[in-house]
């Protein structure tokens, strides 16, 4: 299928409704192969990856958006991040058996956290309790509570690919006919099946759902796995610990090994490298005291 690892926008020419379709293949495989995720968690990761890309498509900003699920069930953390250019990465933490567990059984007493980090401007974070039996339902609730925009989301994933579709009613020129058209389009979209969403090309899929509507499909954008970890970022993290703690590490064990939880890349720092970072931390600390 030509729509692999892509995000594609579409609009309805005769109504105030927009949509996005995402397909993830290689990027999804890269993420789930970083760790030995059980099958239910693999599929949830695929749905979350599609969801975060669909969310970035609804925003006009340059920066990063994070979708996070936190709870005290089997799945304790799921974190997926995407830039406005659909560069995506993800990780999760779990404990116990996951087989044959429902979404609510995996995530107990959980909350959904959406964080927007623009390159310029103010950081935004929205937090809502999980309300729904699937991730798409929870996200629809989030949009109604936080964005107050009627939004519908469909998500699907199997062992090789993941896909998602978003429909959103735009607020401009509100009228009774707009409301009727939104209801009509979402009723048509409800006939979507997971297999069709995963396997059909976007053009065929949209024609199957909306062949009596006037739909305009825009040029697709690539979606790729990309981790932002680096040796320099690890050094910044170590320096932020402060000179005293770094000196404790130099004494025992005498080195630091950091493994990225998103891509499994490893960064190793020996004692002489740590000493330089300790000196830099001490300089920063003395500078701060001088300004106090």
Image (cartoon, rainbow, N blue to C red):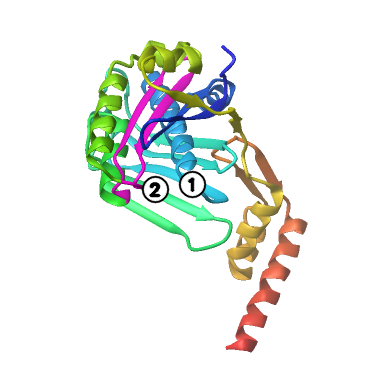
Give residue 246's mark. none
Q: Secondary structure at mark 1?
A: strand
Label count reads 2
| Rendered location of residue 23, percent (x, y) | 51, 23
**Could you say where residue 258 lies in the image, as x and y percent from the top left?**
61, 45
In the image, taking residue 239 as reference, residue 137 lies left or right, namely: left
Q: Which residues are magenta?
A: 147-173
| Residue located beneath label 2 in the image | 114
The quarter of the rendered structure image containing the N terminus is top right
- Relative to 251, does residue 109 appear above or below in the rendering? above
Label 2, secondary structure: give it.
strand
159 displayed left or right of 63: left
Say if residue 54 shows up in the picture: yes
Q: Which residue does the numbered mark 1 point to in the structure image?
A: 65
Residue appearing at x 69%, y 66% in the figure: 278
Q: What residue do we see at 70% from left, 49% from top?
A: 231
């Amino acid at each position: 299928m030509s729509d692999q690892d892509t995000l594609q926008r579409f609009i309805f020419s005769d109504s105030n409704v927009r949509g996005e379709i995402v397909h993830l293949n290689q990027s999804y495989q890269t993420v789930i192969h970083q760790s030995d995720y059980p099958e239910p968690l693999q599929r949830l990761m695929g749905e979350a990856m599609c969801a975060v890309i669909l969310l970035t498509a609804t925003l006009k900003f340059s920066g990063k958006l994070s979708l996070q699920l936190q709870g005290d069930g089997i799945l304790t953390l799921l974190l997926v991040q995407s830039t406005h250019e659909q560069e995506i990465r993800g990780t999760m933490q779990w404990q116990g058996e996951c087989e044959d567990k429902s979404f609510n059984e995996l995530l107990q007493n959980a909350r959904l956290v959406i964080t927007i980090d623009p390159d310029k401007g103010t950081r935004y974070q929205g937090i809502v309790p999980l309300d729904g039996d699937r991730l798409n339902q929870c996200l629809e609730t989030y949009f109604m509570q936080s964005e107050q925009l009627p939004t519908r989301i469909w998500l699907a994933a199997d062992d090789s690919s993941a896909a998602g579709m978003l429909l959103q009613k735009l607020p401009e020129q509100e009228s009774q006919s707009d409301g009727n058209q939104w209801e009509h389009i979402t009723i048509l979209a409800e006939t979507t099946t997971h297999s069709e969403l995963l396997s059909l090309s976007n053009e065929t899929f949209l024609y199957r759902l909306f062949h009596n509507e006037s739909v305009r499909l825009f040029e697709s954008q690539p979606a790729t796995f990309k981790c932002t970890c680096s040796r320099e970022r690890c050094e910044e993290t170590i320096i932020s610990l402060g000179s005293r703690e770094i000196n404790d590490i130099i004494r025992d064990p005498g080195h630091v090994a950091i493994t990225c939880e998103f891509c499994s890349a490893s960064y190793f720092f020996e004692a002489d490298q740590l000493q330089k970072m300790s000196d830099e931390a001490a300089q920063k600390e003395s500078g701060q005291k001088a300004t106090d």
